[in-house]
Image: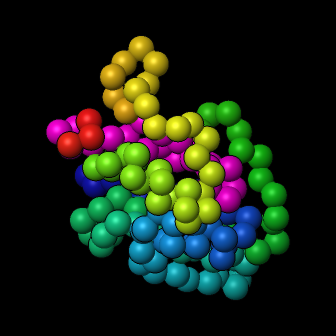
Amino acid sequence: MQFLHTMIRVRDLDASVHFYCDVLGLRELRRKDFPGGRFTLVFVGLGDEGDHTVIELTHNWDQDDYEMGDAFGHLAFGVDDIYATCDALRAAGAKITREPGPMQHGSTVIAFLRDPDGYAIELIQNKGSDHE
């Protein structure tokens, strides 16, 4: 078994692709329009889908708002230097919603930001890095 992707629905496909690719540094791997179903799928990730779990951005052409719900938590990415990463993301226009620092009741260094649709993105300092 292989974990392939996580799908999230997005309101503005261009803004989401910009965020995930230009701000976070993922690559657009593939895109397909489904005119009969009136939706577009864009897959973004850090590497080839055969080797990495990716994010499927789903844009329904006729729907411009979604309920976030309270069951979904966040997407998480490991980074080598969480402080430099947050500085770079902030400079690229991202809004850091929780500055980097140790998590409450633990020592793991984390930070949070939001994508254009309000999905939470957690950054986690990689274990064994110089900034752990």
Residue located at (66% from left, 71% from top): 15
Residue 56 seen = no
Q: Place residue 34 in its image quadrant.
A: bottom right
Q: How is the image coloured?
A: rainbow
> Depth check: 86 or 11 in front?
86
Where is residue 95? Give x, y as percent: 63, 51
User: In which quadrant is the C terminus drawn?
Assistant: top left
Where is residue 43? Give x, y as percent: 48, 71
Residue 131 seen = yes
Q: Compared to 28, does 65 lie above or below? A: above
Q: Place residue 69 in its image quadrant.
A: top right
> Depth check: 58 or 116 in front?
116
- Point out the residue furthest to the left here: 128
Q: What are the residue bounds of the magenta stretch?
A: 110-129
**Residue 53 falls inside the magenta stretch:** no
Q: Is residue 18 left or right of residue 132?
A: right
Where is residue 11? Give x, y as percent: 74, 65
- Point out the residue furthest to the top here: 105
> Depth check: 69 or 100 in front?
100
Q: Is residue 126 left or right of residue 44?
A: left
Q: Is residue 33 left or right of residue 66?
A: left
**Residue 126 falls inside the magenta stretch:** yes
Residue located at (51% from left, 58% from top): 89
Residue located at (67% from left, 59% from top): 116
Where is residue 42? Give x, y as percent: 54, 74
